[in-house]
Image (cartoon, helix red, strand yellow):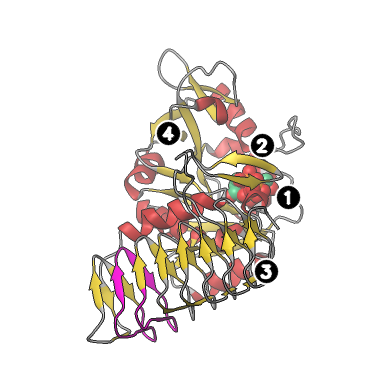
């Protein structure tokens, strides 16, 4: 089935990681987030992908122009970010007359779930949660078909939420011109509402789903996809290094003496680990990243060109590109009271729901030696700290 993948969003909740990179291009276990969505869709039966790009579009185009994904890919530009219905309207001229699927390009799905969805006819993927009031909730009629989608209802009609995965009937192609919603966007859920008022739209359960909107969800995405990897060692591993669990070491990566890596972990091309470093899963090290002597990295993303050179601890954290941690930089990832760590998202402190969470560093952050950073701190791109600083607030 022809499948539209929405990848034009700005990813404001993912700041500072999206300061100059689109959220769909953030790294998840060795490839961009949106590549997982697209590949899962193809595995599930997508015959053609129409990728809607917008914010920092060139990075997405460049990746897919080089990648061989086995089905035709067409790019469509959404000039202004006016909502998901507007994004699909931009893709409409590229669609043939049949039904079409739409997927959020920043969500992870399982192929089996998407296969069921694509084979169902008009359908929406639904995921069961304990806190439906925070999402778009699906209401069903007495026959079990979709009756409507209610955004963040105080009194939710079910605990089934919208996963941003849809199959629309062909007729929806002419019915994308929905009015702006209260939040000023043209919403695809309003197109879905129109569809379910004229045809039966199935509510297809999805076993596993992750909406990757906020920085800790990027960690969760890596935890999910790293756990699916099988060992593959193509780089150089010193005989005095110990590798356990499933670990991918790309060609051109180097593991030096005394290193212990406990998978799942992914070491990209050009990355170096050691000597005497400890990398624990689930950890992703990007191209040319460096983890040096007496450094422990646990359950973190350390993106391309970033270096934690000496005597440091990095846990449960997301670190952007070309970051440099000075010797002795340590990150806290646990509160003494064991309460979930909070993080600033769009100006508000929100719970990550995680007992363990460290820091989020934008690109090119540089810390001075012996910097201590408290759990839940966000450092914007290009932030610097001086020697011996204790950082307890966002910068
Ligand atoms: P959102 O998660 O609502 O938006 P976003 O990804 O830009 O993130 P944030 O809220 O943090 O700024 O979007 C859902 C999906 O739809 C996502 O894959 C991006 C995509 N999208 C578009 O392609 N065009 C749009 O105009 C909008 C609003 C979203």
Q: Nearer the viewer, mark 3 or mark 2?
A: 3
CB contact under 8 Å: marks 3 and 2: no
Q: Nearer the viewer, residue 28 or 176?
A: 28
Q: Nearer the viewer, residue 369 or 377?
A: 369
Which element is circle 4 on?
A: strand
Magenta includes 308? no
- Which badge, 4 or 2, comes first in the chain's sequence? 4
- Which badge, 3 or 1, comes first in the chain's sequence? 1
Mark 4, Cα crowd under 10 Å, few <14 / some 14-19 / many 20+, is many
Magenta stretch, overall SS? loop
Above or below 265: residue 123: above
What residue does disc 3 label? 385
What residue does disc 1 label? 81
Q: Nearer the viewer, residue 351 or 118?
A: 351
Dot label at residue 187: 2
Mark 1, Cα crowd under 10 Å, few <14 / some 14-19 / many 20+, is some
User: Which residue is situated farthest in the front direction here?
Assistant: 388
Q: Nearer the viewer, residue 107 or 382?
A: 382
Q: Distance between the Cα atoms at labels 4 and 1?
A: 26 Å
Q: Position of residue 64 (x, y in %)?
A: 53, 69
Magenta includes 273? yes
- Which badge, 3 or 4, comes first in the chain's sequence? 4
Q: Position of residue 202 (x, y in %)?
A: 43, 29
Above or below 87: residue 130: above
């Amino acid at each position: 089935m022809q499948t539209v993948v929405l990848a034009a969003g700005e990813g404001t909740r993912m700041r500072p990681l999206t300061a100059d990179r689109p959220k769909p291009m953030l790294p998840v276990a060795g490839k961009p987030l949106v590549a997982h969505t697209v590949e899962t869709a193809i595995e599930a039966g997508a015959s053609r992908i129409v990728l809607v790009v917008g914010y920092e579009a060139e990075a997405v185009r460049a990746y897919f122009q080089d990648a061989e994904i086995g089905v035709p890919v067409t790019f469509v530009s959404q000039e202004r970010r006016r909502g998901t219905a507007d994004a699909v309207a931009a893709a409409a001229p590229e669609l043939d007359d049949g039904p079409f699927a739409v997927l959020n390009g920043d969500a992870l799905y399982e192929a089996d779930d998407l296969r069921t969805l694509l084979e169902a006819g008009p359908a929406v993927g639904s995921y069961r949660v304990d806190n439906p009031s925070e999402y778009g909730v699906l209401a069903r009629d007495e026959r079990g078909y979709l009756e409507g989608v209610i955004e963040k209802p105080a009194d939710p009609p079910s605990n089934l939420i919208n996963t941003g995965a849809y199959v629309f009937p062909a007729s929806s192609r002419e019915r994308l011109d929905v009015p702006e919603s209260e939040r000023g966007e043209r919403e695809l859920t309003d197109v879905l509402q129109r569809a379910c008022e004229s045809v039966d739209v199935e509510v297809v359960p999805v076993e596993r789903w992750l909406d990757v909107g906020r920085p800790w969800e990027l960690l969760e995405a890596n935890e999910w996809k790293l756990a699916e990897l099988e060992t593959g060692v193509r780089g150089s591993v010193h005989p005095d290094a110990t590798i356990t669990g499933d670990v991918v070491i790309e060609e051109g990566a180097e593991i030096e003496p005394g290193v212990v890596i406990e998978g799942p972990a992914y070491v990209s091309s050009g990355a170096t680990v050691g000597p005497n470093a400890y990398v624990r899963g689930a950890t992703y090290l990007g191209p040319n990243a460096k983890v040096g002597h007496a450094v422990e990295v646990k359950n973190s993303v350390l993106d391309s060109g970033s270096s934690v050179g000496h005597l440091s601890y990095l846990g449960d954290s997301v670190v952007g590109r070309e970051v440099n941690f000075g010797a002795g930089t340590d990150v806290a990832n646990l509160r003494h009271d064991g309460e979930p760590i909070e993080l600033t998202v769009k100006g508000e402190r929100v719970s990550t729901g995680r007992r363990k969470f460290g820091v989020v560093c934008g690109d090119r952050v540089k810390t001075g030696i012996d910097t201590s950073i408290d759990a839940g701190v966000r450092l914007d791109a290009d932030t610097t700290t001086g020697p011996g600083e204790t950082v307890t607030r966002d910068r």
